[in-house]
């Protein structure tokens, strides 16, 4: 049987070498169990699509020894939600005018766990008979756990073209197929961007251990070279949850007591977290976080859905003196195109399709003493900016660069990417176990003082608290 297949392919290639043109019937690209923020549809960029078609045409002409390869005008694109699978099917109609080609590209999350895969199938048909059919697959691995735990863009247009081209070459045999993981999202790329945006800066490293995203216990230090610029020990205090008086809750309790039927109701709740920042020189800054949620509760059941109705307010105190306050907000901007549509499905609700992803930004604005403060985390790019009185104070790459650590904000991903674990943050956090410490590149002004470093740590900590405690987003479509 194998000999017969080889003879068929050899005859096919001989026929194609006698001046025939080949035709790509369809190029199909699909996402499954993932989103356009991580993997934007870069085929929407005409130059990227044309470059990919040109690269692929060259590979097909070499493989098939064809005079030319004709491509369709557009790519068939689909986002598969729920439990759907990709279908690798050639169109039913067959032509006798030359070879027909189908290219099927498929980015999918694993059925269980967090691993991502890019699969490519290429089928070549001649006179209604399949003469080439090959599938290749690679795991796409983000550099650190932040890519799996935040709304991060994994691929640039250039990355998309390069990986697509590699898969085409492997499927056609011009490169040997392998099971090598393709690593994306190197922090060096973001550091290069920061150096462009913030030229008069120098690199430091924020080393942090504990529940820094949850306003739990954590320890942090800012290192510049071999020196420690400043360190911070944060101790969580007490949390409180106060339900505001509600007639709906009273009515639901009475109804359940009389009828025995569990009834749901909405409850407005004030939540507070308190803690203390401690510095090596003995100075302390007390923190109070406060926000309001609307919680959907039931009389007999625990848990439910909560929605933030008033955003996080952070207050800082030096002793009994109020030293600063910040307001946290979050927005999502959808990067639409002229082909963007909005659909509804039972798995995701309303969903924009054919976009270049959603750019989520989280920011705090307020005052530290008399200084106006602004800090923003752009999840899409993975970069944090800090400014004081409209002057850039610091920029940070929100990627854990410790090669021994697989965590991001206390959440740790298993080595096989099957599940996430939460680490302990009880008591004072120690840097003794290297694999539990997270490293984040921070760029500060050249020769930044200890006071600048301390201010930077305070502001970043307050931004982190907002990132970890506020889950409700405000979305709008970019026009």
Image (cartoon, rainbow, N blue to C red):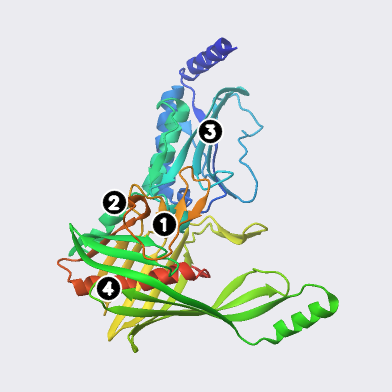
Badge 1 or badge 3: first in the primary sequence:
3
Distance of label 1 from label 2 (alpha carbons): 18 Å
Do we see residue 68 in this rendering?
no
Query: x and y percent of residue 62 in the render?
Result: 41, 25
Distance of label 4 from label 2 (alpha carbons): 31 Å
- The part of the image, by quadrant, that contains residue 49 is top left
Label pair 2/3, CB-CB below 8 angstroms: no
Task: State the residue in front, 127 or 138.
Answer: 138
Distance of label 1 from label 3 (alpha carbons): 35 Å
Query: x and y percent of residue 453 in the render?
Result: 23, 70
Disc 1 on helix, strand or loop? strand
Distance of label 3 from label 4 (alpha carbons): 58 Å
Badge 2 or badge 3: first in the primary sequence:
3
Label pair 3/4, CB-CB below 8 angstroms: no
User: Which mark, by number, is residue 188?
Assistant: 2
Distance of label 2 from label 3 (alpha carbons): 32 Å
Label pair 1/3, CB-CB below 8 angstroms: no
Q: Which residue is mark 4?
A: 279
- Compared with 450, 101 (above or below) is above
């Amino acid at each position: 049987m194998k000999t017969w297949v080889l003879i068929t392919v050899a005859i096919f290639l001989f026929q194609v070498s006698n001046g025939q043109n080949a035709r790509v019937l369809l190029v199909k690209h699909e996402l499954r169990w993932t989103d356009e923020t991580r993997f934007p549809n870069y085929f929407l960029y005409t130059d990227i699509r044309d470059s990919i078609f040109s690269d692929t045409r060259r590979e097909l002409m070499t493989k098939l020894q064809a005079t030319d390869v004709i491509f369709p005008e557009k790519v068939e694109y689909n986002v598969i939600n729920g439990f759907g699978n990709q279908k690798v099917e050639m169109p039913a109609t067959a032509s006798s005018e030359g070879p027909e080609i189908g290219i099927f590209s498929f980015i999918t999350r694993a059925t269980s766990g967090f691993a991502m895969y890019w699969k490519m199938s290429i089928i070549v048909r001649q006179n209604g008979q399949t003469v080439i059919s090959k599938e290749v697959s690679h795991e796409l691995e983000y550099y650190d756990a932040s890519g799996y735990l935040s709304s991060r863009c994994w691929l640039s247009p250039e990355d998309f073209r390069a990986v697509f081209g590699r898969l085409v070459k492997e499927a056609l045999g011009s490169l040997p197929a392998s099971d090598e993981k393709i690593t994306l999202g190197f922090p060096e790329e973001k550091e290069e961007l920061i150096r462009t945006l913030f030229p008069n800066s120098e690199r430091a490293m924020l080393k942090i251990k504990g529940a820094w995203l949850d306003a739990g216990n954590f320890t942090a230090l800012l290192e510049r070279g071999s020196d420690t610029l400043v360190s911070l020990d944060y101790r969580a205090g007490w949390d409180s949850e106060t339900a505001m008086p509600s007639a709906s809750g009273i009515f639901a309790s009475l109804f359940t007591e009389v009828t025995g039927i569990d009834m749901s109701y909405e409850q407005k709740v004030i939540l507070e977290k308190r803690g203390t920042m401690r510095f090596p020189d003995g100075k302390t800054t007390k923190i109070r976080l406060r926000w309001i949620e609307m919680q959907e509760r039931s009389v007999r059941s625990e848990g439910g859905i909560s929605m933030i109705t008033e955003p996080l307010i952070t207050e800082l105190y030096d002793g009994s003196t109020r030293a600063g306050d910040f307001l946290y907000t979050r927005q999502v901007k959808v990067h639409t195109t002229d082909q963007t549509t909005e659909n509804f499905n039972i798995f995701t609700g309303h969903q924009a399709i054919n976009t270049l992803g959603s750019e989520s930004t989280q920011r705090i604005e307020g005052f530290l003493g008399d200084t106006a403060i602004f800090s923003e985390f752009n999840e899409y790019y993975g970069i944090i900016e800090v400014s004081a009185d409209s002057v850039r104070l610091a920029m940070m790459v929100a990627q854990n660069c410790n090669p021994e650590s697989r965590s991001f904000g206390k959440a740790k991903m298993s080595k096989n990417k099957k599940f996430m674990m939460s680490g302990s943050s009880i008591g004072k956090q120690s840097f003794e176990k290297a694999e539990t410490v997270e490293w984040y590149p921070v760029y500060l002004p050249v020769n930044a003082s200890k006071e600048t470093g301390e201010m930077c740590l305070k502001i970043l900590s307050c931004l982190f608290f907002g990132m970890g405690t506020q889950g409700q987003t405000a979305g709008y479509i970019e026009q």
